[in-house]
Amino acid sequence: MPLPSGDSLLVQIMSASFAEAAERAGDHLLCRPGCSQCCHGAFVLSPLDAMRLSAGMEVLRATEPDLAREVEHRASMWMVEYETGFPGDFQTGILGDSPEDRERFEDFANDAPCPALDTETGRCDVYAWRPMTCRLFGPPVRMGDGQALAHCELCFTGASEAEVAACEMEVPFELEADLLAEIPSKGETVVAFALLTPVSVPTR
């Protein structure tokens, strides 16, 4: 199935929200092109994020085939290296949802560079199509009602709680949830599989 049409609105809102938070944060926010600490370690990818990355790879294959092949090569090498211990079905790339699988994921590929990362430049080769996790990393974000604000450990050094709170990034979680509800496939995966597989992921 195609990427939900509302995803473009989600991306637009996220970009505007990040820009507003960054303006309020000023020098407290150290995120810059080439800073790639947050680009290491596997993380859970939603079906929506997987579809966006897959769609982005289709664009790269058509417009920058050499770059697309390099990204695919890195993704393939990632899969070779981390097949052992994958907490799910390695044939489909779908992560397991049992308590045991989720516990195993906590220690899985924690130091691995993202296959979308150009380690020489520190830049993401699929930046325009990056997942939600990547779009909200850096500024203070509240992941749920009543939860404390969390931000990149490199940022807001020496800032007071009030200064951090003043830079909170608003995230349209409800819109994301609505878009996810449009997708019949509910399996979660990781970046390497999304870069190499078709737009949709198998239904559990």
Image (cartoon, helix red, strand yellow):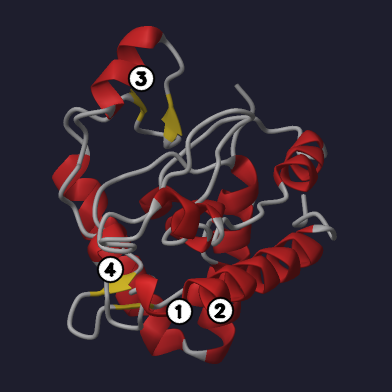
Label 2 crowd (10 A; few <14 / some 14-19 / many >=20): few
Q: Residue at x 19, y 27 (%)?
A: 85
Mark found first going from the N terminus, 2 or 4: 2
Question: Looking at the picture, which amino acid does disc 2 mark?
Answer: Glu
Residue highlighted by disc 2? 23
- Contact (CB < 8 A) between labels 4 and 1? no
**Residue 162 position in % (x across, y down):** 48, 53
Residue 176 marker: none
Q: Amino acid at mark 1?
A: Gly
Q: Kindly identify which residue carries mark 1.
A: 26
Q: CA distance from mark 2 to mark 4?
A: 37 Å
Callout 3, which amino acid?
Answer: Arg
Q: Which residue is mark 3?
A: 102
For label 4, the crowd category at 10 Å Cα-Cα, with few meaning under 14, some 14 to 19 and many 20 or more, is some
Q: Secondary structure at mark 1?
A: helix
Residue indicated by mark 4? 73
**Do callouts 1 and 2 mark residues in contact (Cβ within 8 Å)?**
yes
Q: Is residue 114 visible?
A: no
Residue 125 found in image quarter: bottom left
x then y, percent, for residue 128: 56, 76
N-terminal label among 3 and 1? 1
